[in-house]
Amino acid sequence: MSSITRDEVAHLARLARLQLPEDELEHYAGQLDAILHAVARVTEVAGEDVPPTSHPLPLVNVTRPDETHRSLTAEEALSGAPAAEDSRFRVPRILGEEA
Amino acid sequence: MKTVEPDLVPYDEAVAAYDVVMGIEVHVELSTASKMFCGCSTAFGAEPNTQTCPTCLGLPGSLPVLNQQAVESAIRIGLALGCDVAEWCRFARKNYFYPDMPKNFQTSQYDEPICFDGATTVEVEGREFVIPIERAHMEEDTGKSLHVGGATGRIHGADHSLVDYNRAGIPLIEIVTKPIEGTGALAPQVARAYVAHLRDLLRSLGVSDVRMEQGSLRADLNVSLRRAPEAPFGTRSETKNVNSLRSVERAVRYEISRHAGIIDAGMKVTQETRHWHEDTGITTAGRSKEQAEDYRYFPEPDLVPVAPERAWVEQLKAALPEPPAVRRPRLQAGWGFSDLEMRDVLNVGALDLIEQTVAAGTAPAAARKWWLTELARRANEQGVELDALPVTPAHVATVQSLVDAGELNDKLARQVFEGVLAGEGTPEQVVEKRGLKLVSDDGALTAAVEEALAANPDVVAKVRGGKHQAAGALVGAVMKATKGQADAARVRELLLERIGVDH
């Protein structure tokens, strides 16, 4: 039983901005399918009394007081940026993404 | 892809032929000192990228920690809107590639909002409309993009963009209504009244500075039309980031006319986001929704769930300020305003301003007069909200006290406001610098009075003959000679004294 199709892999690749050639789409569909099946086995042992778990530790309400700390300088913030201009991060044109 | 849009249908025809359904999403920036998940400052107007850190820049190894004050504000907003507060809820990652978030995801809440299922009531033209609230959830604001190379600084035609992440990570509450039905032709006004109501409510809670022109309160307006209230919902458009009350009303109105035109032409409304253009009063197409909405939400592993204690929630509920629906009638009764006067006050957003002016010692009628006439006119001229003027309630109170003390008349008072608006300082400083002082000192007035009497012997004769109202012309002459700075009542007394008749 195949639970993930080649088209779904292509869709995910597009969402993740990954350019995958045709043969790799097939290849990853098979691999992802194996992973999903492995994870699916967990549901076989989880009964009604076991809620889906997103956090392994039983912690809630971890907060900090509303206090400010020192921020980076603009130079520090931009030091890892591939491109900067006027103290701002310079990024490629956005329109292609939005249209 | 360019499509030809059919002509707009005149608004009255559109609402006669179709039933309007709206959904409104309001984003409000909280006025916390620090960001949602890190300690960077939220102050507006700082130099670009001077309020960031590894956490809000999404650098490897950084971890978010939730701002306690933001949680409290979110709960108080929900309670004020009659919502239930979740026993337990989580944050989620909303994944998308857009450079306004450096992390490539926005930390938000997905199917577990902290507040849900509320309702609030607004009034338009004497009718009450219940606005059902779907949810109010916590999230973070995005960075600010500057588009370079385009003709107008807009995204279209831009060569590249420059991003400032100061705003990225500022606590945001998104308040989402359920479908708002049954408003008929009043839909645009109901939308405006709702956003104005939220603004008042959020201000009274003290959780945000609700400055629409700075973007700390902005609305996304979903509009759809259907043939009849019984019909299923039509396809909606979502006009994004509308940031003034006036624009909220105009954008809804425009979309109703636009949708009606499309449906009348036998075409289908496209489900998409729209951009509102303040200058031309129209919307244009943005992203098409069908393919855009695949955000692959999943629970945020770096933040543990929020489980507000019931006792704390009850405590916050008990401490909520007086709701606007109670406060307004109380203030109206206390001030002795008619329903019509009160409606005008609410329409121009002067309620808080008048309350503060009255608290500073001014009579309610005088406070209303200044805010609704002279100052409302100035705000309108400048295209800003009344409370964005540099004139404060304390200024108005000072000016009115000078009028009450006989040191200024209304004409001079208007000049004082003009000076304050022009940045010449406080009312006292303007009075001083411009030499605005009512002349009631007899010595200074006598010369002008004598001159007026000498120049108008025929008028003097009429007054002496018993026509006291003729003295008005003489008063006018003196006022003219003193450039409006004379105390008119005192001038009249002096004139009648000299002519030798009782006054």
Image (spheres, rainbow, N blue to C red):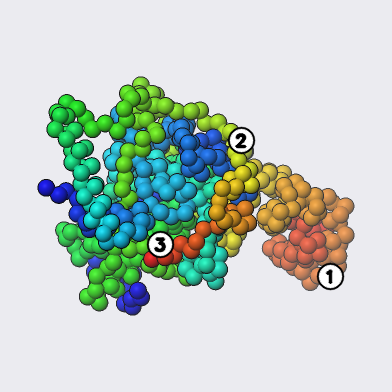
- Pick the quarter of the image with the N terminus of chain B: bottom left
Residue B80 percent across, percent down from the top left? 38, 36
Q: Which residue is drawn at 35% across and 53% down?
A: A16
Q: Is B281 located above or below residue B197 in the figure?
A: below
The image quadrant that residue B477 belongs to is bottom right
B391 lies left or right of A91? right
Secondary element under disc 1, as helix, strand or loop, is helix
Asked if disc 1 and disc 3 are in contact, CB closer than 8 Å, the reply is no
Reading the image, the residue beneath label 3 is A97
Give me the chain letter of mark 2.
A
Q: Are marks 2 and 3 on the same chain?
A: yes
Q: Distance between the residues labelled 1 and 3?
A: 79 Å
The amino acid type, in three-letter code, at marker 2 is Arg
Q: Which of B462 and B94 is in front in this view?
A: B94
Tags 2 and 3 in contact by the CB under 8 Å rule? Answer: no
Using residue B408 as the reference point, say whether residue A74 is left or right of it. Answer: left
Location of residue B254 (image quadrant) = bottom left
Foreground of the two, B463 or B128: B128
Residue B221 in sight from this viewpoint = no
Question: Hey, what amino acid is under mark 3?
Answer: Glu
Count the marks. 3
User: In the rendering, which numbered label is found on residue B147?
Assistant: none
Q: What residue type is labelled 1?
A: Ala
**Helix, strand or loop at mark 3:** helix
Q: How many residues crowd mark 1 within 10 Å: few (<14), some (14–19), many (20+)?
A: few
Residue A70: which numbered mark, if any?
A: 2
Residue at the spot of label 1: B455
Residue B131 percent location from the top left of the image:
31, 47
The chain under label 3 reads A
